[in-house]
Amino acid sequence: MQGDISPSALMERIEAEEQVTVLDVRNTQRFEQWHIDGPSVDAVNVPVNTLRTTDPEAALADVPTENVVAVCNSGNSSRTAVP
């Protein structure tokens, strides 16, 4: 994982149709209600509680390792949830 990315920088990447995987660490119900989407976006939901209570490597096994941006409600959980 790289460092922080601002919401506007993520939006620019999406608008430029740059391939990006959005790892949404919010709970599943919130993810199902709304999540970041787009033609070049692969949205994946792995709740932060899953990452904290199971082996993170196993939980993230199907998530690509490049062009991944972790997101949550405020930036706090996503910042600490993944290596």
Image: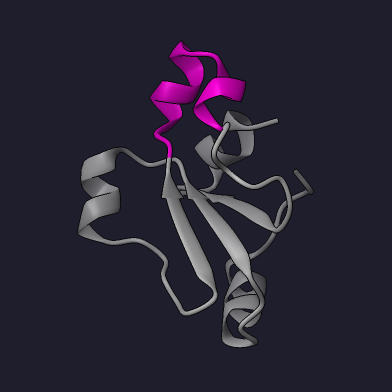
Kindly indicate the quadrant of the structure image that contains residue 9. Answer: bottom right
Taking the spot 27% from the left edge, 61% from the top edge, the residue there is 34
Q: How is the image coloured?
A: one colour
Residue that sits furthest to the bottom in the current view = 16
**Residue 39 x, y percent position in the rendering:** 47, 80
Asked whether residue 50 is drawn in magenta, I would say yes
Among the 4 quarters of the image, the one containing residue 47: top left
The residue positioned 44% from the left and 49% from the top of the image is 44
Q: Is residue 40 above or below residue 66?
A: below
What secondary structure is the magenta-colored segment mainly?
A: helix
Query: Residue 57: where, in percent of width, then height?
Result: 61, 23
Is 6 on the left-hand or right-hand side of 40? right
As displayed, is residue 32 above or below residue 55?
Answer: below
Between residues 27 and 59, which one lies in front from this camera angle?
59
Q: Is residue 79 magenta?
A: no
In this rendered view, identify the residue nearer to me: 17 or 35: 17
Residue for point 65% across, 87% down: 16
Image position, residue 58 (x, y; %): 55, 22
Left or right of residue 33: residue 10: right
The C terminus lies in which quarter of the figure? Answer: top right
User: Which residue occupies the extreme front position in the image?
Assistant: 62
Looking at the rendered structure, the number of numbered marks drawn on it comes to: 0
Which residue is nearer to you in this view: 64 or 46? 64
x 58%, y 86%: residue? 15
Q: Position of residue 18 (x, y in %)?
A: 66, 77
Q: Quadrant of residue 69?
A: bottom right
Residue span colored magenta: 46-60
Which quarter of the figure is the N terminus placed in? top right
Drawn side of residue 68 relative to residue 75, left or right: right
